[in-house]
């Protein structure tokens, strides 16, 4: 009886019939696979979305000059071309993100675990500290310290959270993801594709901070810092997905605003 059961299991494995639940996946591998998915990227971004959109409305209630994350403005201007604005535009953005995640993961078994979401945020916090140490040390060795951003604490916190969400959506998902798909069709090796997409995406990410009415005056130290920071986020996005990249960016900015990184 036992021999027969083993034979059936071996035969099913050979022909690809063995259920994935028959062989337990190592916990880290299961966590890594799940949190890298579009499903976790979308769901983990929802708290950032709600926090930013709520906080920025409150910030701008009494502001003489409203502030926004420019990448978010770009996305909402595109949505306005469809006739969607205000609350309808936000609802369309969420629906579009959820639909995209469903289409990408519809043939995958993605387990939803609360501990995975906690792990994703904790992992992102560790990356935020690590990126800060590496990038700040590299820029500090080349230039004088970059002055902190001006503005009230509540405003800076709102912009920090919004940057983590919208800049990662524009520059990682759309830009770096698009560059990766483009260069994959033109180049033979995956390593070269990753490298070119990450480098070009980081340069465009850094340069975009100096464009438009909300852009900063150009300064080489801040450009280099943003380039290296963008390069680190590109690597995280390609290796760990949108959710980890967005939370790493947001938590890094929040830590800087709160003075937690020195």
Image (cartoon, rainbow, N blue to C red):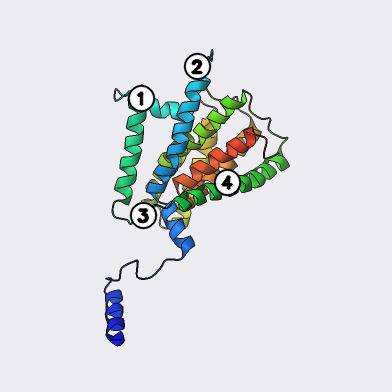
Residue contact between numbered discs 3 and 2, judged by CB atoms under 8 Å:
no
Distance from label 4 to label 3 (Cα)?
23 Å
Which mark is first along the chain, 4 or 2?
Answer: 2
Residue 149: x and y in percent read 63, 28
Quadrant of the rendered image containing residue 100: top left
Which mark is first along the chain, 1 or 2?
Answer: 2
Residue 255: x and y in percent read 62, 38
> Residue sitting at 54 percent across and 40 percent down?
249
| Element under disc 1 | helix
| Element under disc 3 | loop
In the picture, the quarter occupied by the N terminus is bottom left
Residue that label 4 marks: 125
Q: Is residue 16 above or below residue 49?
A: below
**Circle 2 crowding by C-alpha within 10 Å: few under 14, some 14–19, many from 20:** few
Residue that label 2 marks: 61
Distance from label 1 to label 4 (Cα)?
31 Å
Distance from label 2 to label 4 (Cα)?
31 Å
Residue at the extreme top of the image, as rendered: 64
Q: Residue 110 carries which label?
A: 3
> Residue sitting at 50 percent across and 16 percent down?
61
Which mark is first along the chain, 2 or 3?
Answer: 2
Question: In the rendered image, is residue 200 in sight?
Answer: no
**Circle 1 crowding by C-alpha within 10 Å: few under 14, some 14–19, many from 20:** few
In this view, the residue in front, 253 or 193, is 253
**Circle 3 crowding by C-alpha within 10 Å: few under 14, some 14–19, many from 20:** some
Q: Which mark is residue 87?
A: 1
| Element under disc 4 | helix
Distance from label 1 to label 3 (Cα)?
30 Å
Which mark is first along the chain, 4 or 1?
Answer: 1
Residue contact between numbered discs 4 and 3, judged by CB atoms under 8 Å:
no
Q: In this view, does 65 lie above or below 43?
A: above
């Amino acid at each position: 009886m036992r021999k027969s059961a083993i034979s059936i299991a071996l035969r099913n494995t050979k022909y690809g019939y063995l259920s994935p639940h028959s062989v337990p996946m190592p916990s880290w591998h299961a966590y890594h696979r799940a949190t890298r998915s579009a499903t976790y990227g979308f769901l983990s971004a929802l708290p950032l979305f709600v926090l930013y959109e709520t906080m920025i409305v409150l910030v701008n209630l009494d502001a003489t000059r409203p502030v926004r994350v420019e990448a978010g403005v770009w996305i909402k201007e595109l949505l306005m071309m469809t006739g969607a604005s205000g609350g309808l535009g936000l609802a369309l953005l969420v629906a579009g993100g959820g639909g995209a995640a469903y289409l990408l993961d519809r043939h995958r078994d993605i387990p939803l675990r609360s501990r995975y979401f906690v792990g994703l945020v904790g992992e992102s916090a560790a990356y935020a500290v690590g990126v800060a140490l590496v990038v700040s040390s590299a820029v500090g060795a080349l230039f004088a310290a970059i002055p902190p951003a001006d503005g009230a604490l509540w405003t800076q916190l709102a912009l920090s959270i919004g940057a983590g969400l919208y800049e990662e959506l524009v520059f990682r998902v759309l830009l770096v993801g698009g560059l990766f798909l483009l260069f994959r069709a033109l180049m033979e090796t995956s390593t070269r594709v990753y490298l070119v997409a990450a480098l070009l995406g980081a340069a465009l990410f850094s340069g975009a901070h100096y464009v438009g009415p909300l852009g900063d005056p150009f300064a080489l130290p801040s450009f280099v810092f943003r380039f290296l920071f963008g390069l680190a986020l590109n690597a995280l996005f390609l290796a760990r997905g949108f959710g980890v990249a967005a939370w790493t960016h947001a938590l890094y900015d929040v830590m800087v605003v709160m003075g937690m990184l020195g």
